[in-house]
Amino acid sequence: MLSEPQQEQDVIALFHQLVGSGLIKGLHFFGTTSNDRYDSLIEIDYPDTVGFRFNRKTCSLGVGSAIDFPYKSEPKVLEYKYDLDALISDLQKEEKFLKHIDLVVCWTAGGGYSSMLELRPLLVGDNGQERLFYGSTHAAYRVVGGEGSRI
């Protein structure tokens, strides 16, 4: 990485580089656009091979045991933001809808998101066992009446 992302387009470029280089595994892109409501349509494809399943010592970015291998998903919506707070703004303006978004890729999370989402780290201890997307660093839970339900 030559420089840190400064805007959403930088986040998109960096993420595509991480996927293309194989550091983030199992993602296939149907398309990425800046003209539609949502940014990207993806498919998750985890073959039944070594290197995808979470293991604290050997595969710390792998996916948890809740996923049966081999695994191929239906199309999923991926949303990019420089800051997670920008997504909350889009949700509040009803430009985007939380129920439609499966994965968010962002560079920062300023804190304004906390009125709607709780973030739980997946890089601590055995928390990676909860990971659904290879390489994801956090799981987001919708804050509803003081309780969280995973989104």
Image (cartoon, rainbow, N blue to C red):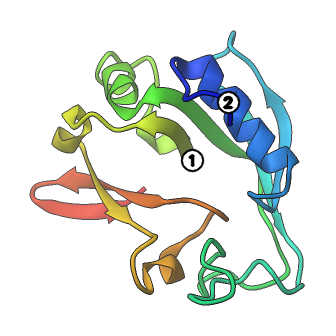
Q: What residue sits 74% from the left and 19% below the top?
A: 33
Single out the mark in the foreground, 2 or 1.
2
In three-dimensional space, the C-alpha distance between marks 2 and 1, rounded to whole angstroms, equals 25 Å
Q: Where's residue 139, x and y in %?
A: 42, 61
Residue kind at label 2, given as amino acid type: Leu
Where disc 2 sits, the SS reads: loop
Q: Where's residue 123, x and y in %?
A: 45, 70
Left or right, residue 75 beside residue 139: right
Q: Where's residue 50, x and y in %?
A: 85, 86
Q: What residue sits 80% from the left and 84% below the top?
A: 69
Identify the disc placed on residue 2. Answer: 2
Q: How many residues crowd around disc 2 within 10 Å: few (fewer than 14), some, or many (20 or more)?
A: few
Identify the disc placed on residue 80. Answer: none
Where disc 1 sits, the SS reads: strand
The quadrant of the image that shows the N terminus is: top right
Q: What residue sits 79% from the left and 39% below the top?
A: 17
Is residue 19 something one can see in this rendering? yes
Furthest-left residue in this view: 146
- Which residue is tagged 1? 103
The quadrant of the image that shows the C terminus is: bottom left
Q: What residue sits 48% from the left and 26% below the top?
A: 82
Furthest-front residue in this view: 2
Q: Is residue 27 above or below residue 58?
A: above
Left or right, residue 37 beside residue 110: right
